[in-house]
Image (tube, rainbow, N blue to C red):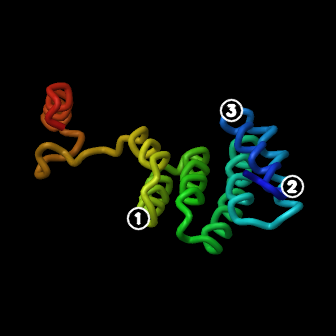
Amino acid sequence: MPDSEAEKLFASGLQALAGNNTLTALVLFEKALAKEERPIFSSYMAFCIAKERGQFQLAVTLCEKAIAREPQNPLHYLNLGKIYLFAGKKSEAVRTFREGLARESNQHIIEELDKLETRKPPVFSFLDRDNPINRLLGIVLKKLGFR
């Protein structure tokens, strides 16, 4: 149960975020951060800044500072990975999600990685990935459930 005013604002921000109201969440996280400096507050605020304002570099910087202060918290990695996805940097997002999982198992990170569905190696490694044989066999094997 949150007892400080900053924690109450943060909890309200999380509720707004769960309701897909990022703009309200951003305002609440900014107010919470103004009252009390916490890495988790800036991590979530960074996510909202990236989603609402498209200020990806600022968001990345805020999240990286949160990770520097709390490197074992997987939520920071989750937020940073989502920011990278907003910015169109899929490989950095995957790397960040995996770093977060290395710290601690987190179901939300696992779900994000599953959504990204990274590419599997080609069926025949001696052929180019774009070779029609590799493409066709990959599709057939996936439909049959072998890949």
In this view of the protein, which residue sits in the foreground, 13 or 145? 13
Kind of element beneath mark 3: loop
Q: Residue at x 42, y 47 (%)?
A: 110
Rate crowding at label 1 as few (under 14), some (14 to 19) or many (20 or more) other CA atoms within 10 Å.
few
Is there CB contact under 8 Å for labels 2 and 1?
Answer: no
Which residue type carries mark 1? Answer: Ala
Question: Residues under labels 2 and 3: Cα distance?
Answer: 23 Å
Which residue type carries mark 2? Answer: Glu
Rate crowding at label 2 as few (under 14), some (14 to 19) or many (20 or more) other CA atoms within 10 Å.
few
Kind of element beneath mark 2: helix
Instruction: Decide: is 18 above or below 36.
Output: above
Q: Left or right of 54: which side holds 28? A: right
- Residue 124 in the image, given as x and y percentages of width and height: 11, 46
- Residue 130 in the image, given as x and y percentages of width and height: 24, 40
Dot placed on the residue nearer the N-terminal end, 2 or 3: 2
Question: Residues under labels 3 and 1: Cα distance?
Answer: 28 Å
Residue labelled with disc 2: 5
In this view of the protein, which residue sits in the foreground, 68 or 142? 68
Residue labelled with disc 3: 20
Residue labelled with disc 1: 102
Dot placed on the residue nearer the N-terminal end, 2 or 1: 2
Question: Residues under labels 2 and 1: Cα distance?
Answer: 33 Å
